Image (cartoon, helix red, strand yellow):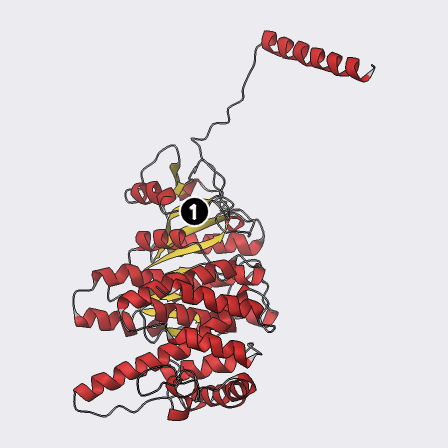
Amino acid sequence: MFEQTFNNIDDILWKEGGCSNELDYVEQTSWVLFLKYLDNLEAEREEETELKGETYERIIDKKFRWNTWAAPKTKNGEPDHTKALTGDDLTNFVNNKLFPYLKKFKETATTPQSLEYKIGEIFGELRNKITSGYNLREILWYADALSFQSSEDKHEMSHLYEDKIRRMGNAGRNGGEYYTPRPLIRTIVRIIDPKIGETVLDPACGSAGFLCEAYAYMKQKVKSVADRETLQKKTFYGQEKKGLAYIIGIMNMILHGVNAPNILHTNTLSENMANVEQKMRKDVIIANPPFGGKERAEVQQNFPIKTSETAYLFMQYFVKLLKAGGRAGIVIKNTFLSNTDNASVMLRKELLENCDLHTILDLPSGVFTGAGVKTVVLFFEKGRPTEKIWYYQPDFGRNLGKTNPLTEDDLAEFVKLQKKKTDSEKSWTINVKDLNPETYDLSVKNPNKKTEVELRDAKTIIKEMQSLDEENRKILAKLSI
């Protein structure tokens, strides 16, 4: 129902001089969708309060509400084109009045977890890139047709929004940092199996794909109003450094059904690990931390194992932030298993001694579109040392890529075998006591994988050589005519 609306908005943005790629399309669509959602949410809260005989005080002042400036209506509920701002009047209002007004909410909000704070954070981070007030007017009318009223509406829009994020992830390196294939995330969540009442954290949440999929998985276990309230307010936590990813993450969680996401706009690695308290720790951490990045020397001082590699700093943070008995599923570059630098060796040693690294899933190249790197997924539980590690190395029988992506069926056997850590042609178990204590090398080496060399007999080889000689003789004969 809403797909054509999304396509129409994209078509307008494609013609817009201020928007040049998929990143801009998602960013600009996000702020418009957020304000439409906010208006629907306030109307719903107002109606519920009135039914109780109480009065609801809206967050947004009347002149800045959606139905006042974005989509004014006649008494019959039709679009009121005479009252609707357009052209320069519209862009001047949005840029010089609306955005500054919304930005101030961050200063007046009582807590970073409040909806008011998130409004201020979002509109302090971005700017309107739609330079034509006529294009913006068209987009607003299209957006007004979208509805956040029912779970079916949100479900459809969440799929459409996810598709936009996926396309953004394929648009270039900056976008690619935000997107992890959803079949992989769903598989990780299934293995971790988060329970209602547990807290779930992604300290590098990007577009919040891990948190969205964890919510989708856990809401199937809801049995009471209290369970639903717990999922909404006391379960999911995220942190994100980059402004655009933060905005997209909040919008993505809203569309998936979490009304006021607990996502903070902060650089996780700037937090001093020595200041981590028990009340800050979480039951579950699922993440795909950025790798290949470099952090400044002052940031590295926050960690016992000094390294500039962002993924390695995040790994230390993950272990520290887990509760005793807490579980983690982490995507990381496969070189983490074998690098011989001091930081890599120390980090592997630390992980093996303080956590039960029970499962390593080896992923082929092509899982992450355009990334060109091989990754693994580490599954571990904090609180006891590792004794055995179960490896799984899939063979999909095809090359993965943009037109041939990873599916959940590809990982179905992994999920099945992992339950009992069953050994097979694709899976095997190692004892940690057999590792070299100087390197703690965890490289993926399938003992069941045999390299087959095709040996041909001499007669076959001679016959093929004679055939090739005959072909060459005929070609030379033609050339000499």
Q: Is residue 401 visible?
A: yes
Relative placement, left or right, of 126 versus 205 is right
| In the foreground, 270 or 90 | 90
Q: Is residue 282 above or below residue 118?
A: above
For disc 1, the marked residue is 406
Number of marks in the rendered image: 1
Q: Residue at x 31, y 53 (%)?
A: 190
Which residue ends up furthest to the right in the rendered image? 480
| In the foreground, 335 or 160 | 160
Q: Is residue 325 visible?
A: no
Q: Is residue 178 above or below residue 239?
A: above
| In the foreground, 261 or 129 | 129
Relative placement, left or right, of 109 versus 24 is left
Q: Residues within 10 Å of mark 1 (few under 14, many from 20)?
A: many
Q: Which amino acid type corresponds to the residue marked 1 in the rendered image?
A: Leu
Q: Residue 177: image x %, image y %?
A: 52, 61
Relative placement, left or right, of 473 versus 375 is right
Q: Residue 70: image x %, image y %?
A: 43, 83
Q: Is residue 404 above or below residue 270?
A: above
Q: In the rendered image, which quarter is residue 39 located in? A: bottom left
Q: Residue at x 54, y 81 (%)?
A: 133
Q: Residue at x 31, y 80 (%)?
A: 41
Q: Residue at x 43, y 69 (%)?
A: 249
Q: Residue 353: image x %, image y %?
A: 41, 54
Q: Is residue 174 above or below residue 16?
A: above
Placement of the C terminus among the 4 image quadrants: top right
Q: In the rendered image, which quarter is residue 2 located in? A: bottom left
Say which element carries label 1. loop
Q: Residue 161: image x %, image y %?
A: 41, 64
Placement of the N terminus among the 4 image quadrants: bottom left
